[in-house]
Amino acid sequence: MADTTASLISTPASPAAAELPVKSRSYWATVAGRVRRDPVTLACGGILAAIFLAAIFAPWIVEADPYKTSMLRRLQAVGSPGYLLGTDELGRDMIARLIYGGRVSLMMGTWPVLNALIIGGFLGITAGFVGGKTNMLIMRTVDVFYAFPSVLLAIAISGALGAGLMNSIVALTIVFTPPITRVSESVTTSVRNLDFVEAARASGARSFTIIRVHILGNVLGPIFIYATGLVSVAIILASGLSFLGLGVKPPEPEWGLMLNTLRQSIWVNPVVAALPGAMIFMTSICFNLMSDGLRSAMDVKL
């Protein structure tokens, strides 16, 4: 009996047991792991998170009133007592103006892209999945907007609608809907003819079910990554509209409008005049680098 027990204990595992497949990591777990190993993406995400949190909790972060003027304290230098980043041409605290201005600039950068993501994603997925005349109608209509550069189109629409926050958001939504529609249509067309979609169609699944279960899960990732990169462009365009007087109206704090009002003071206090531009540059480059990092992380071959 003891020999039998010893032989059972010492018997090696069967070849079949040794060849059992090891469960692989899921796709999103692999993506998350690659993002955690990318210091540039993590740093950019941390900077953007800090900017968003500062804009959201601005009343609890700064006590100064971003609208309070004082001609006696105008154009104070960076590091002045009580004004860490100085004051603008009307004596308003620059820290308060920059933080509160982040609210408007981020809103003008994210809302149009989110709106375009919903509208353009719906149009592109519909065109790519249905095909035929529907595809031709949607895509040829979208191609009309490509006859105009995005900057000129945004200026033309904003000029027709008039200055204002909501009109700028509408104008930028119209500008960003066509490129998202084209990307959505291209990705959906490539997925539509894959084997698992054909199998679902052959099994009698309805078109809505195929789109919801099989199409969306494969196309939303690339569309979202592309839209993330457009946020930086939206912030720059929104700031340009405000700089030209077609965006937010004074005295609202907005980075592009602050650049416009401070440009006359660049020879008196160039550091303070450059602060809004530095915020635009830092936010835009962080969105671009984070979008590139997410795109690289999602390029996983399982």
Image (tube, rainbow, N blue to C red):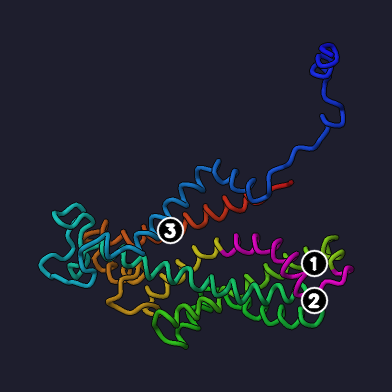
Q: Rounded to the nearest whole Å, what is the CA distance between mark 1 and mark 2? A: 10 Å
Q: Nearer the viewer, residue 248 or 21?
A: 21
- Please indicate whether residue 258 sits to the left or right of residue 296 in the image: left
Q: Which residue is mark 2?
A: 131
Asked if labels 2 and 1 touch by Cβ distance under 8 angstroms, the answer is yes
What percent of the width, then of the height, locates residue 252?
A: 30, 75
Say which element carries label 1. Answer: helix
Q: In this view, which residue lies farthest toward the top?
A: 3
- On whether residue 212 falls in the magenta region, the answer is yes
Identify residue for label 3. Answer: 283
Location of residue 218 in the rendering, given as x and y in whole percent from the top left corner: 71, 61
Q: Is 209 rendered above or below residue 98?
A: below
- The percent position of residue 150, horizontal first and vertical second, equals 55, 73
Residue at 57 percent across and 50 percent down: it is 293
Magenta span of residues:
201-227
Q: Position of residue 36 (x, y in %)?
A: 54, 43
